[in-house]
């Protein structure tokens, strides 16, 4: 797989990297009061003109939330947590799951049956429901558990949700590749398992693992959005009063959390939820573009590999046909009489 041909992938990665860099550096170069709450709008006589959330304007491009905080600044603040969490979880799933799948399928395939029995519930219970059950007691209530401990716990749970799929996909793919004639021939000629794994299996496995990583990114984003609807925000939640009314809010301000905490405002103030939801959709589209281009290039590579060999073979046979004459054939009766 040559990276030079992946133009859409390079563009999508550049956009995602630019968003991540902007979010990381915003803490250092952004306004000092980007987390502060704004006052109500008053007239000259001190009467309240308008209460937040304020709609988009020149001062606030994406409007404000119910706390009168700038949605654009909140998104920039929490974007890095969303991208970092999704990348770490997806990379851990593929790295650990694929490594264990390679080792077990190559050296100890009998263990696969025990692993499959252990993770059997994951095939029948929705992953979002499992995540809610495992996170509810730790993340949902207001407690004194440190934020970093909650984030680490959530990342571990998210990792376990996708580990079985990566593991079994790797074992099945390694088993399929190992059944190829060139692999069995190498084993019959005395090639070690490590040599076969390094030279013959890994080169065919790498493109599939890259595609699997992109698929895990999409799945992790979907689970985070589902958890946010149930107020299970990344890092937990905190409660702040606004006009004597309290509502749960995400501590990290990550995109899924901002969307979940403002989900009910879609009717009265749609810009509050659509600000973070729109950026989430953009990230989804960029990742799907990467996924589709990887699949298209893999299919094109497979088709080219499948066509080239038969074409060459057909040309060789045709060249041999040109040299065939009736003199090359000996009738069976004549051949028997000669003997």
Image (cartoon, helix red, strand yellow):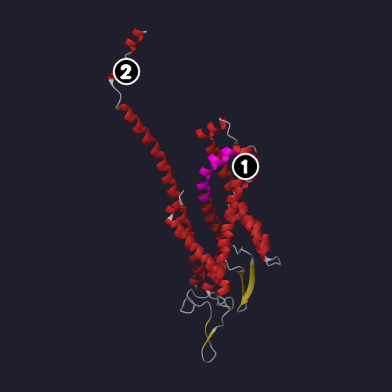
Q: Quadrant of residue 23?
A: bottom right
Position of residue 132 in the picture relative to residue 292 (left or right): right
**Outermost residue to the bottom:** 45
Determine the residue positioned at 54% across, 70% down: 76
**Which of these two is toward me, 291 or 245?**
291
Q: Position of residue 259 (x, y in %)?
A: 54, 66
Question: How many labels, in total?
Answer: 2
Quadrant location of residue 172? top right
Q: Badge 2: few (under 14), some or many (20 or more) residues near its Cα, within 10 Å?
A: few
Q: Residue furthest right?
A: 144
First in sequence: mark 1 or mark 2? 1
Task: Specify the segment rendered in magenta.
Answer: 194-210
Q: Relative to 136, is 68 on the left or the right?
A: left
State the residue position of label 1: 103
Q: Is residue 285 visible?
A: no
Q: Residues within 10 Å of mark 1 (few under 14, many from 20)?
A: some
Which label was assigned to residue 329?
Answer: 2
Does residue 64 show up magenta in the picture? Answer: no
Mark 1 residue element:
helix
What residue is rendered at 37% in x and 35% in y? 312
Closest to the camera, between mark 1 and mark 2, is: 2
Q: Position of residue 162 (x, y in %)?
A: 59, 51
Q: Is residue 198 magenta?
A: yes
Front one among 146 and 178 = 178
**As drawn, 35 above or below 306:** below
How far from the left and from the top, in percent, is residue 333? 33, 10
The quarter in which the C terminus is drawn is: top left
């Amino acid at each position: 797989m040559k990276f030079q041909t992946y133009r859409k992938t390079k563009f999508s990665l550049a956009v995602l990297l630019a968003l991540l860099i902007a979010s990381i550096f915003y803490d250092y170069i952004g306004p000092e009061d980007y987390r502060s709450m704004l006052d109500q709008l008053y007239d000259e006589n001190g009467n309240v003109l308008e209460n937040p959330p304020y709609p988009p304007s020149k001062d606030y491009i994406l409007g404000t939330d119910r706390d009168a905080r700038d949605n654009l600044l909140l998104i920039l603040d929490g974007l890095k947590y969303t991208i970092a969490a999704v990348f770490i979880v997806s990379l851990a799933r593929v790295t650990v799951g694929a490594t264990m799948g390679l080792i077990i399928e190559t050296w100890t395939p009998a263990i696969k049956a025990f692993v499959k029995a252990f993770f059997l519930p994951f095939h029948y219970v929705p992953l979002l429901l499992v995540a809610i059950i495992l996170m509810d007691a730790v993340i949902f209530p207001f407690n004194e558990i440190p934020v970093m401990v909650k984030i680490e716990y959530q990342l571990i749970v998210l990792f376990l949700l996708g580990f079985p799929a990566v593991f079994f996909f790797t074992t099945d793919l390694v088993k399929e590749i190992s059944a190829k004639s060139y692999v069995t021939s190498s084993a019959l000629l005395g090639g070690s398992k490590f040599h076969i794994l390094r030279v013959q299996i890994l080169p065919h496995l790498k493109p599939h693992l890259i595609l699997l990583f992109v698929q895990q990114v999409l799945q992790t984003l979907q689970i985070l959005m589902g958890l946010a609807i149930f107020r299970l925000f990344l890092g937990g939640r905190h409660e702040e009063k606004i006009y004597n009314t309290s509502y749960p809010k995400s501590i990290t301000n990550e995109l899924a959390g901002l969307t979940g905490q403002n989900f009910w405002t879609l009717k009265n103030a749609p810009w509050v939820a659509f600000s973070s939801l729109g950026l989430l959709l953009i990230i989804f589209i960029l990742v799907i573009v990467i996924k589709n281009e990887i699949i298209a290039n893999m299919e094109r590579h497979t088709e080219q590999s499948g066509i080239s060999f038969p074409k060459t073979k057909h040309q060789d046979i045709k060249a041999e046909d040109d040299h065939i004459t009736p003199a090359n054939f000996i009738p069976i009766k004549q051949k028997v009489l000669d003997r």
